[in-house]
Amino acid sequence: MGPTPYPGPVLQIDQATYDAIVAHAKRDHPVEACGMVAGPIGSDRPERLIEMVNAAGSPTFYEYDSTDLLHLYRDLDDRDEEPVVIYHSHSATEAYPSVTDINLAGEPGAHYVLVSTREHGNNEGPVEFRSYRIIDGVVTEEEVTVVGNNAAEESS
Amino acid sequence: MAIEVRIPTILRTYTGGEKAVNADGATLSALIDSLEANHPGIKDRLIEGTDLRRFVNIYINDEDVRFIGSLEAELSDGDQVVILPAVAGGAR
């Protein structure tokens, strides 16, 4: 096999996790939904979805509750996991990091996923689902590749 | 007196990559000064003016310090301190 060209930054995420993030965003609309997908340290595989409560309960701001945050990171430690995806929704604006998002991004290793529910709100219909790296104030959008679940692949 | 302080990924540039370091102090304020002495620059990431930064969470034995006196929170030998950046943002 010849060398594989460097594919550029990409978030690879399975269909079930993708769907669950979209469903969470639609359910909480117009409040911003937020959460994390954890994965084994160093794997870059988003495997375990954790929906978080938006302690701000706001349509324009989100923040994990401080006690929930501590429990979440303790769990990650116990399971040898790290944050692979940190997601939240924008309910009236595009799925692009705001100045606030950029200033508060505290996990340089994570994929920051933004979902915009501005078009269909709580209803069925497509959403914008985009992913970024946010490092030292620099935003780099990356491709999102949705892959089938293992079970689905085996049955097809 | 030794107090273990857990350092989040984003601040490990100040601790040479260490996930946890030892520091001492009878209050959180003194502990942060002790951290700063060994890891210059870290204090500014934790404190703004005379208060804890709004989007930094510090816990002493699992209690958010904002509920136990903030920078004046008291510490004893063997206490565990955890620093975590808030996970926050939004369209605003």
Image (tube, coloured by chain):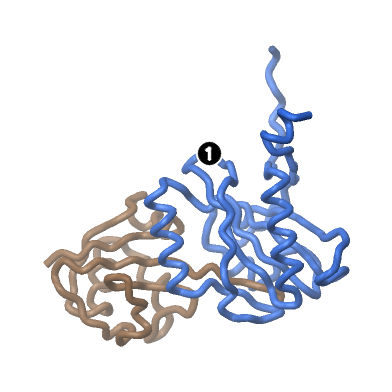
> Measured from the top left, where is residue A71 in percent x and y?
42, 64
Q: Chain of mark 1?
A: A
Residue at 60% from the left image edge and 53% from the top image edge = A85
> Measured from the top left, where is residue A107 in percent x and y?
52, 57
Display colour for chain B: brown
The total number of labels drawn is 1
Amino acid type indicated by mark 1: Ser
Display colour for chain A: blue
Out of A28 and B22, give the one closest to the viewer: A28
Q: In the orientation shown, which residue stands out farthest toward the front?
A: A155
State whether residue A3 is above or below residue A38: above
State whether residue A64 is above or below residue A109: below
Residue B18 horizontal side relative to residue A146, left or right: left
Q: Is residue A136 visible?
A: no
Out of A135 and A59, give the one closest to the viewer: A59
Residue at 68% from the left image edge and 18% from the top image edge = A3
Out of A138 and A16, give the one closest to the viewer: A16
Residue at 27% from the left image edge and 71% from the top image edge = B61
Q: Is residue A115 visible?
A: yes
Badge 1 element: loop
> Measured from the top left, where is residue B83 in percent x and y?
37, 67
State whether residue A109 is above or below residue B60: above
Quarter that holds the C terminus of chain A:
top right
Quadrant assignment, res A117? bottom right
Q: Which residue is mark 1?
A: A43
> Measured from the top left, where is residue A73 in percent x and y?
43, 59
